[in-house]
Amino acid sequence: MRPETPQVTPERFAQGFTFSDYIAYAASAENLRREGTGGGSRHTLGDMSRAMAGWYATTPLSEWQADAMRRLAEHPDGPARVLVVSEEWSSDCRRDVPVFQRLAEAGALELRIFTRDGQRYGATPEPEDSPNADLMRQFLNRKPGGPYQSIPIAAFFDARWRYLYHYTEFPALYHKDTIQARLRARRPGESEGEAGQRYQRDWLALRESPFFRVWASACADEIISELHRRLLPG
């Protein structure tokens, strides 16, 4: 049964990847043999480790974001560890997992990354074929129509392994579902096939646009703000 408050032991946490190890794993033959998004081949997307590493290299925190995270970590009950659940085929993971690493560095937090899926793509509402099902079950996205195995997850714990807060999927000001629905909608004169091809072009262009960097910054802001709120007296 899923506990009311997420829990992780030091031994379980230590089994996760560091950020650099996760980047190396994402490029490995072992990872590329696993099913990708929708159950397709990861080779269709190719090696996404370079994209994630590149995002990290070009998306530093602002001075004030880094300072705020450092102050939170210095609080007696502040964050000391962050547990991440990710799959590199996800554009949300490629955008936000490097941000989690930047936040961890700013606050000298220990970060460990776990894959959501096993060999097969997790298409079910709750995890089944995954060595990390015990972790994912604690952070299911229980929104209308759910639950969903939404990723990325970034769960923060203090030095005594007490749960503080977790971030899910994308920042609140990124209205992804609305954006995708509008991009997918057929336009006058388009066939269904043409609409699908145009959506793929528009979605790729959006991911490469400045807006994705705005949402990456919003991810950091949301996490910092939520951690601050939870550490306020009372």
Image (spheres, helix red, strand yellow):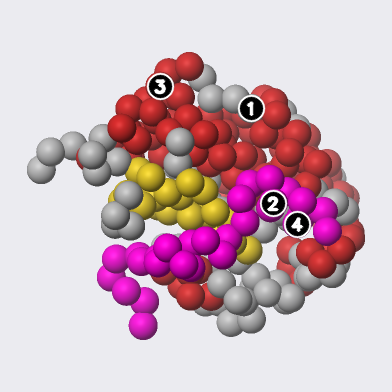
Q: Secondary structure at mark 2?
A: helix
Residue type indicated by callout 1? Thr
Circle nearer the viewer, 3 or 2 = 2
Q: Which disc, if any, is residue 21?
A: 2
Give the answer, above or below, for where 189 lies relative to 136.
above
Q: Closer to the camera: disc 2 or disc 1?
A: 2
Q: Is residue 42 left or right of residue 4?
A: right
Q: Say which quadrant the N terminus sits in.
A: bottom left
Mark 1 lies on a secondary structure that is loop
Where residue 123 appears, as percent x and y from the top left, is 64, 74
Real-space Cα separation, disc 3 to disc 4, in angstroms: 31 Å
Which comes sooner in the sequence, label 1 or label 4?
Answer: 4
**Drawn side of residue 60 relative to residue 91, left or right:** left
Residue 88 % position (x, y): 71, 53
Q: Give the residue displayed 18% in from the left and 37% down from the top.
A: 232
**Which residue was labeled with disc 3?**
67
Percent of width and height locating residue 207: 72, 37
Disc with the residue nearer the chain's start (3 vs 4) = 4
Q: Earlier in the sequence, mark 1 or mark 3?
A: 1
Magenta extent: 1-28
Q: Residue furthest top?
A: 63
- Residue topped by disc 4: 25
Q: Name the residue that disc number 1 marks.
A: 59
Q: Under tag 3, what secondary structure?
A: helix
- Residues packed near mark 4 inside 10 Å, few (<14), some (14 to 19) or many (20 plus): some
Q: Position of residue 53 (x, y in %)?
A: 73, 38
